[in-house]
Amino acid sequence: MKKVIYIIFILLGCNSSLSPLPIIYGETIEGEPFIMGKINRQNLLIYEHSEWFQEEYNRYKVPIGWVEKNKVLLKKMNLKLFLGTWCEDSEREVPGMLKLIDYSGFDLSKIEMYAVSGEKHTPDNYEKGLNITNVPTLIFYKNGKEINRFVEFPNISLAKDLETIIQGESYKNPYYEILIDE
């Protein structure tokens, strides 16, 4: 029971805004609804087709020692997360990303979250100039400059890939060569 209360505290207490942001709804070719635009954690919790988020969040296990090793460096960063609520890769990776971030005590006002269409667009073009080709894409910034990004799926594991980026070690996402060439 204490664990459930702790998770609720993290989800609600760390969020600077308890209200979901206004969103735009879209529909896939198969008729599946999705959301687009700037979002926050609350949008993922209350969107009627996002039961995947809480289920995967609860299932993800933060590796022992991960928080202690990464929280100080992570707190010095800003993040931008692009995801698709229609996307299986986002459904698989985003809950774990946010759980790692939550458990690190990261200030959620320092993460911008955007839900994109299948074409990787938002109505207000938040993706413009950022070369968002696959989702989820989690971009890490330090002192206003992009230092690296996680794209779609891990090379080793979600926790290890994010740790490598946070620690400033050499990291190339699975699409690195493609992104450089474009």
Image (cartoon, rainbow, N blue to C red):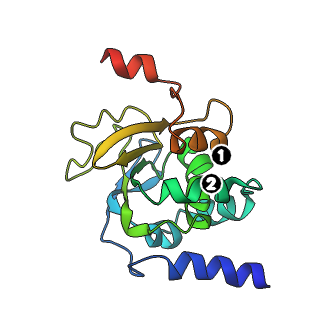
Q: Nearer the viewer, residue 168 or 48?
A: 168
Task: Please tell me which residue is depicted at 39% across the width and 38% down the height of the picture.
Answer: 147
Three-letter amino acid code of the residue under disc 2: Gly
Query: Is 61 left, or right, of 51 in this rendering?
Result: right
Place of residue 122 in the rendered image (x, y in percent of width and height, measured from the top left): 27, 49
Q: In which quarter of the image is the N terminus?
A: bottom right
Task: Please tell me which residue is depicted at 35% across the width and 36% down the height of the picture.
Answer: 132
Q: Quadrant of the C terminus?
A: top left
The residue beneath circle 1 is 159
Mark sitting on residue 148: none
**In the rendered image of this protein, does residue 154 appear above or below residue 16?**
above
Query: Is 143 left, or right, of 3 in this rendering?
Result: left
Three-letter amino acid code of the residue under disc 1: Ala
Mark sitting on residue 96: 2
Q: Which of 34 and 129 is in front in this view?
A: 129
* 1 and 2 marks in contact (CB < 8 Å): yes
Place of residue 131 in the rendered image (x, y in percent of width and height, measured from the top left): 30, 32
- For disc 2, the neighbor class at 10 Å (few under 14, some 14 to 19, many from 20) is many
Task: State which quadrant residue 16 falls in.
Answer: bottom left
Place of residue 167 in the rendered image (x, y in percent of width and height, measured from the top left): 55, 42
**In the rendered image of this protein, does residue 134 appear above or below residue 88?**
above
**Label 1 element class:** helix
**In the rendered image of this protein, does residue 40 appear above or below residue 131?**
below
- For disc 1, the neighbor class at 10 Å (few under 14, some 14 to 19, many from 20) is some
